[in-house]
Image: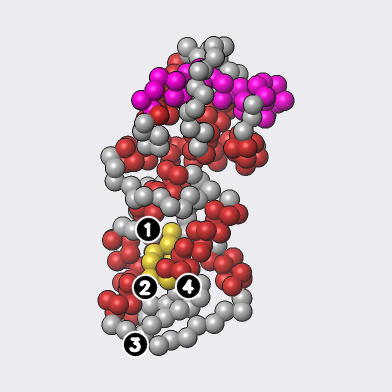
Amino acid sequence: MAVTQGHGNPKWSRDETLLALDLYFTLKGQVPSPKSFEIIALSNLLRSLPYHAEAAKQPTFRNPDGVGFKLMNIRQVATGKGLGNVSNMDRQVWAEFGHRPDELHRITAAIRAGIPVASSGQLPDVDLELQEGRLLTALHLRRERNPKVRGLLFDARRPSGLRCEICELSRPRLEMSMQEAIFEAHHLVPLAEAGERKTRLADLALLCASCHRLIHRMMITRAAPVTIQDVRTMLLPASSTDF
């Protein structure tokens, strides 16, 4: 296999590594020539991701040779046979999905479906990256910030009063428009599981901005889904004070 001449290229992101592992499973652990259709197709896909706009202009960036080397790295993690320059990301992704190819395929399908949206520049900036990776995080945040989603949740909660479902913060003495500025919608179902289905009220939780950021940070730190009850337990004993 030819040398990639890709020194200086950005490190492989989680999303990119997930896509490579998905191809490895599709190929049943066999790594074909960089000239194969499958390798070239993944190379083209990776070069279209909205991560490394400047690097993608270089012919060495995620070229077929580089994709082939990445599959060899994954094979090394999986079988002990392959190239030795394995990254921590390779090991982490294999540990999570090496024995869950079906779940991995659902996640990579969501990544692929989100690429056109990301490439159109319609995604929010991502300052938090959940365990699913940058693209799915951006799609997750875009879904949470959708005015229709927030409106659906606020309409359901107004009759009983707006209250954070984690810390129970409420500000009933404020005008409703001021109360709504405090709270945000949180999606309980990961994007890779829910896909682009119509959002249901049961998929949503009403959180204050602080708890919303906290639950996302916990998901990053744990690299695993975090429930409302997980955060409540961490915060115990909890207390809140109204104006």
Callout count = 4
What is the spatial separation of the Cα atoms under label 4 and label 2, in whole angstroms?
13 Å
Question: What residue range appears in magenta?
Answer: 56-84
Residue visible at 46% across and 65% down in the picture: 212
Give coordinates of residue 214: x percent, y percent: 51, 64
- In this view of the protein, which residue sits in the foreground, 96 or 58? 58
Give coordinates of residue 199: x percent, y percent: 37, 57
| Quadrant of res 152 | bottom left
Q: Quadrant of the C terminus?
A: bottom left
Q: Is 128 on the left or on the right of 182, as rendered?
A: right
Q: Earlier in the sequence, mark 3 or mark 2?
A: 3
Density class for disc 3 (Cα within 10 Å; few <14, some 14-19, many ≥20) is few
What is the spatial separation of the Cα atoms under label 1 and label 4, in whole angstroms?
16 Å
* Residue 103 part of the magenta segment: no
Q: Please tell me whether mark 3 sits on a helix, a strand or a loop.
A: loop
| Residue, disc 2 | 182
Density class for disc 4 (Cα within 10 Å; few <14, some 14-19, many ≥20) is some
What is the spatial separation of the Cα atoms under label 3 and label 1, in whole angstroms?
26 Å
Q: Is residue 116 above or below residue 226?
A: above
Q: Earlier in the sequence, mark 2 or mark 1?
A: 1
- In this view of the protein, which residue sits in the foreground, 37 or 177? 177
What is the spatial separation of the Cα atoms under label 4 and label 3, in whole angstroms?
19 Å
Residue visible at 52% across and 29% down in the picture: 20
- The type of residue carrying mark 3 is Arg
Give coordinates of residue 157: x percent, y percent: 36, 75
| Residue, disc 3 | 173
Give coordinates of residue 8: x percent, y percent: 49, 27
Q: Please tell me whether mark 1 sits on a helix, a strand or a loop.
A: helix
Q: Earlier in the sequence, mark 4 or mark 2?
A: 4
Q: Earlier in the sequence, mark 3 or mark 1?
A: 1
- The type of residue carrying mark 1 is Glu
Query: Is residue 28 at least partly visible in the picture?
Result: no
